[in-house]
């Protein structure tokens, strides 16, 4: 293997790939179709993934380069010697590996070909792989929007089930801070879009907006009907594409804020995807947007600005345990749940055992703070998210939204005076009064929407929270909040 990889490296004479894939528009197309180039230039795409076997001549990559677009060939498995020949022959800028099979082989290939951009699509169980210096891309994710109702089981009063992915990027940023938080799901059955289901063209805007707002990036991939309509010049598809271009401009203008820390005062300790993803998903659906801290890298938490930290089904190292308990002793609220019902509790005997005749959880006092202890592992992540909200107590929540169950949001600190509230409506245009409260006292607010000039929004002081109301809310909205009058 090593000899083969050295041979591959000798073939690559391209300069280092100059594009930061985490910060630019990256797209995917099912083939090397020249008709796509002017469309991708319109949204200022800087990288395009196409199947390697659809590139037949150097002309396609050359035409893309003329518009500032780097072409990356997608291959199944570790690239062969022939794949690398094609890269140099057709002037491609990189290789994207699907179904890699082996982390070490990916790393060796990437190190041996420093002139190439190397991406690797990882499944959930592969997220812990070290594939550096290649760029890891999570292949999972749900196509954003309102999940189709099960007519046979849904009740008339039930809230819509929102498929969203901001939690996914929060997980990637928290668990793997040394690499870009990138996802590359497509509109197929794996993301909840079987052939018989059609999705709104506007859902593409939602997908890239939630990725950027959560500090990550999504490889833009269009549903078949959208792409085909676009190539035919269909008016609806063209209008959607123009809107996407404006959405991308809006997001790019606020990239610095998205890259920073959120204003979350809650955190979830993460072990791996299976343990964390539903806890995060349900928390984000309740507008908590918690930070993610790996169980093996828990640092001092007291004085961090966090108010509630949840350690459910994890096994922290001894110093991590000390930091968690110290957080509660210093006045924070700690939520604990075991990995197994009969397993050891690392927090015993510091946290008192369950009093007799109690329910399946109980509160305990610890120093200046409190601890909520589950007696059994978390079974219902939705209930767990509600418990996190209860654990905040009578203090202001970071974000609350009324009368719009399909609208999810998150808040970022821009600087000491300003914050940015991102609102994403997953359910189409909402034409009813939406009330929103954000923790903190803000005197001014400006609404930023794609294709429209900023407009002032009235802010009301609600005792430690700032209240805003909207009559119409659709797509993506950014509200810049400023302290003072």
Image (cartoon, helix red, strand yellow):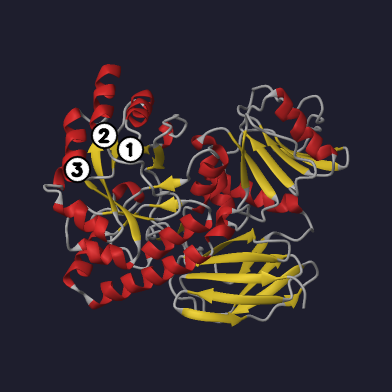
In the figure, 303 relative to 453: above or below? above
Where is residue 139 drawn, in percent x and y? 37, 43
Q: Secondary structure at mark 2?
A: loop
Compare marks 2 and 1 and give the one earlier in the sequence: 2
Q: Which residue is mark 2?
A: 12
- Using the numbered discs, state the Cα–Cα distance from disc 2 to disc 1 in whole angstroms: 6 Å
To which quarter of the image does residue 98 belong?
top left
- Using the numbered discs, state the Cα–Cα distance from disc 3 to disc 1 in whole angstroms: 18 Å
Q: Secondary structure at mark 3?
A: helix
Where is residue 399 drawn, in percent x and y? 66, 62
Compare marks 2 and 3 and give the one earlier in the sequence: 2
Q: Secondary structure at mark 1?
A: loop
Where is residue 229 drawn, in percent x and y? 21, 69
Farthest-out residue, right: 367
Position of 324 compared to 149: left or right?
Answer: right
Give residue 52's mark. Answer: 3
Q: Name the residue: 38% across, 37% down.
A: 123
Q: Which residue is mark 1?
A: 115
Q: Could one spot residue 240 in this view of the protein?
A: yes
Mark 1 and mark 2 in contact (Cβ < 8 Å)?
yes
Q: Name the residue: 17% across, 63% down.
A: 35
Q: Residues within 10 Å of mark 1 (few under 14, many from 20)?
A: some
Mark 1 and mark 3 in contact (Cβ < 8 Å)?
no
In the figure, 192 relative to 470: above or below? above
Which residue is more in the foreground, 185 or 357? 185
Which residue is more in the foreground, 149 or 138? 138
- Using the numbered discs, state the Cα–Cα distance from disc 2 to disc 3 in whole angstroms: 17 Å
To which quarter of the image does residue 51 belong?
top left
- Which of pointers 3 and 1 indicates the residue nearer the eye? 1
Which residue is more in the foreground, 466 or 147? 466
Position of 91 compared to 116: left or right?
Answer: left
């Amino acid at each position: 293997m090593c000899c083969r990889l050295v041979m591959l490296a000798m073939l690559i004479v391209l300069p280092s790939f100059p594009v930061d894939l985490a910060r630019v528009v990256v797209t995917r197309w099912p083939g090397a179709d020249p008709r796509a180039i002017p469309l991708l230039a319109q949204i200022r795409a800087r990288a395009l993934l196409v199947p390697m076997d659809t590139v037949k001549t150097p002309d396609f990559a050359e035409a893309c380069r003329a518009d500032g677009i780097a072409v990356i060939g997608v291959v199944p498995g570790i690239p062969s010697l022939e794949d690398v020949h094609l890269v140099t022959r057709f002037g491609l800028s990189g290789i994207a590996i699907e179904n890699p099979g082996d982390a070490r082989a990916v790393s060796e290939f990437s190190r041996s070909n420093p002139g190439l951009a190397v991406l690797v699509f990882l499944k959930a169980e592969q997220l812990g792989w070290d594939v550096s210096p290649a760029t890891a891309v999570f292949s999972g994710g749900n196509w954003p929007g309102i999940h189709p109702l099960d007519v046979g089981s849904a009740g008339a009063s039930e809230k819509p089930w929102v498929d969203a992915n901001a939690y996914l990027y929060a997980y990637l940023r928290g668990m793997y801070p040394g690499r870009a938080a990138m996802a590359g799901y497509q509109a197929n059955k794996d993301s909840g879009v079987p052939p018989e289901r059609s999705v709104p063209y506007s859902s593409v805007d939602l997908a890239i907006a939630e990725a950027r707002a959560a500090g990550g990036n999504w490889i833009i991939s269009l549903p078949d009907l959208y792409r085909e309509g676009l190539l035919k010049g269909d008016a609806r598809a063209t209008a959607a594409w123009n809107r996407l271009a404006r959405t991308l401009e809006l997001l790019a203008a606020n990239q610095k804020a998205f890259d920073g820390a959120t204003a979350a005062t809650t955190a979830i300790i993460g072990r791996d995807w299976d343990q964390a993803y539903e806890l995060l998903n349900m928390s984000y659906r309740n507008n908590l947007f918690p930070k993610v801290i790996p169980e093996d890298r828990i640092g001092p938490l007291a004085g961090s600005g966090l108010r509630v930290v949840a350690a459910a089904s994890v096994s922290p190292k001894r110093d991590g345990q000390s930091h968690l308990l110290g957080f509660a002793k210093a006045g924070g609220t700690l939520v604990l749940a075991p990995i197994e019902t009969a397993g050891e509790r690392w927090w015993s005997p510091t946290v008192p055992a369950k009093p007799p005749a109690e329910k399946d959880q109980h509160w305990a006092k610890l120093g200046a703070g409190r601890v909520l202890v589950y007696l059994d592992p978390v079974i219902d992540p939705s209930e767990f998210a509600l418990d996190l909200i209860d654990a905040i107590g009578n203090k202001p929540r970071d974000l609350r939204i009324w009368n719009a169950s399909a609208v999810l949001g998150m808040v970022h600190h821009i600087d000491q005076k300003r914050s940015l509230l991102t609102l994403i409506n997953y359910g189409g245009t909402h034409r009813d009064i939406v009330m929103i409260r954000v923790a903190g006292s803000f005197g001014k607010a400006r609404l930023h929407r794609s294709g429209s000039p900023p407009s002032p929004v009235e802010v009301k002081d609600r005792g430690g929270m700032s209240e805003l109301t909207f009559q119409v809310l659709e797509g993506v909205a950014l509200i810049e909040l400023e302290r003072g009058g």
